[in-house]
Amino acid sequence: MSENCSVMGEKRAGVIGLGVSGKKISQALLKLRYHPIAFEKKRKEEFLQKEENIRFFEENKDKIEFVFDYKTEDIIKRKKEFEFVVLSSGIKHDELAKNGINFISELDFVSQNLPENSKVILITGTKGKGSIALITSKILKKLGLNHFVGGNIGEVEGKVSTLSDSILSDEAKKTGIFLFEVSSFQLRSSAKIHPYTLAISCIEKDHLDYHPSFFDYFFSKIKLSTQSEFVVYSEKFAPLSRKYEVSKVIPSPIASFEKIFDVEWREKKIVIKESKNRREIELDSEGFEIDGIELEGAKSNAICAVGILTTLINPEDLKKIKIENIQKKFSFEILGKVKVEGKDVIVINDSKSTNLISLKNAISSLKGRKIVLIAGGRVKGFSFSEIKDFLSEAEVFLIGEAKEEIAKDLGKGTICQNLEDAFRKSIEFIKKSSEKEFFLLFSPGCASFPDFESAEHRGKEFERIFRDFKETSK
């Protein structure tokens, strides 16, 4: 169903999907003097159940044409009406390409509308890309370098910052550096952007419910490497890597890569090693160990961030500052320590764990400790049998849509009704155990749907459950 607006611009452009990124794309098109036609899968009544959607619709119903409950045929019939169609995050291009629709990814759309000579840094990978973007941003701020940071990163300084916010923000025009945290969904449909630096944290199986194969997922992550000026990547694209390589891309009919730096973690220092003369630069670090827990994922993120910075500035300048960890909300966030019948229980909220590599990273940071794990949700094309041995020493409590399937894959696990039930049963297990210290880890390793709206919603709920438990335990 189409909701016609009263103001029609000369230039028309389509937007597919009205999630967070789709709404921002529509606003960016308006700023660029296009008349947007927004296609949304949900029925109007369903879309308007959320307050932010009501506000967006009311503010823009005279500027944007809304098409609710659309089918692909609706776009095909109208393809001659618009110059191009922008895909919001998560929208596949396959059917559009087959039917001759002139589509463009949000990433390509944004890159074409940035100031001339902008340096676009793309940060991707199965795990850690958001933290890498924030660490890089924090260091740039310390060095007094203006920049924009956005993408799938969520909130930046209290505000949601998408790729299209780089067009909407007047402040962004004053900077020449753009840090974009991007997913395989956005990269898969992108082809026109030429990044200054492409940084890849690690690549493991993920989103196989979206990608037709692991190769499709892998290729989405790496395909822009030959169009970049620099590439930063973990050794063998491995998770929890203690070494990253920085290479300059040599353009030619068959692109080649010249390694210029290695960035390594040695004890408590980050070391930059120049490839040509083997000269080493040591950097001080802080915040990568909490209560005796080595934050292996955070260390890997930090050296990737330093690798990115070597492509932007003289590495010697990094000696002026201390490289600090950034604690992202719901990413291995230590909520606190409580006493349960004389036993110490450290509670960790890792709700942003949406795949097996995230879960493995969390477990690795607690190696040798007694772990009580709450996991589960909706699996994304992988099997927990892949990490069966990894979880052999953990006591596991399972929630969500795939809990029975996960229990079967692991050959163990207590099935729980919901997150609150899992927390209660975890505490009961701890009470009966003879151990004196436990780490109660909420690291789902799955998508949050359908029980929660997002990983953030899931994390807030776990935070509430823990807070209520602390209050009643006083």
Image: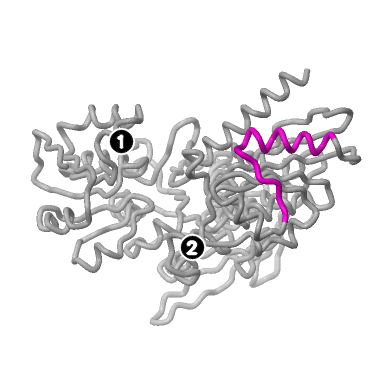
Residue 26 appears in which quarter of the rendering? top left
Amino acid type indicated by mark 1? Glu
Which quarter of the rendering shows the C terminus?
top right
Residue 99 appears in which quarter of the rendering? bottom left
Which label was assigned to residue 46?
A: 1
**Residue 414 part of the magenta-drawn span:** yes
Query: Depth check: 437 or 151 in front?
Result: 437
Which label was assigned to residue 208?
A: 2
Who's the residue at 27% across and 58% down the image?
104
Query: Depth check: 112 or 317 in front?
Result: 112
- CA gap, disc 2 and disc 1: 28 Å
Which quarter of the rendering shows the N terminus?
top left
Q: How far across and how far down the image is residue 455, in percent?
A: 53, 41
Q: In this view, does 200 lie to the left or right of 472?
A: left
- The answer to whether residue 408 is visible is yes
Binning the other alpha carbons within 10 Å of mark 2 as few (below 14), some (14 to 19) or many (20 upward) gives some
Who's the residue at 29% across and 31% down the image?
48
| Magenta stretch in the rendered image | 412-431
Q: In this view, does 442 lie to the left or right of 65?
A: right
> Is 11 placed above or below 171 here?
below
Q: What is the secondary structure assignment of the residue under circle 2?
A: loop
- The answer to whether residue 321 is visible is no
Task: Assign the magenta stretch its main secondary structure.
Answer: helix
Q: How far across and how far down the image is residue 32, in percent?
A: 21, 43
Q: How far across and how far down the image is residue 14, in percent?
A: 20, 50
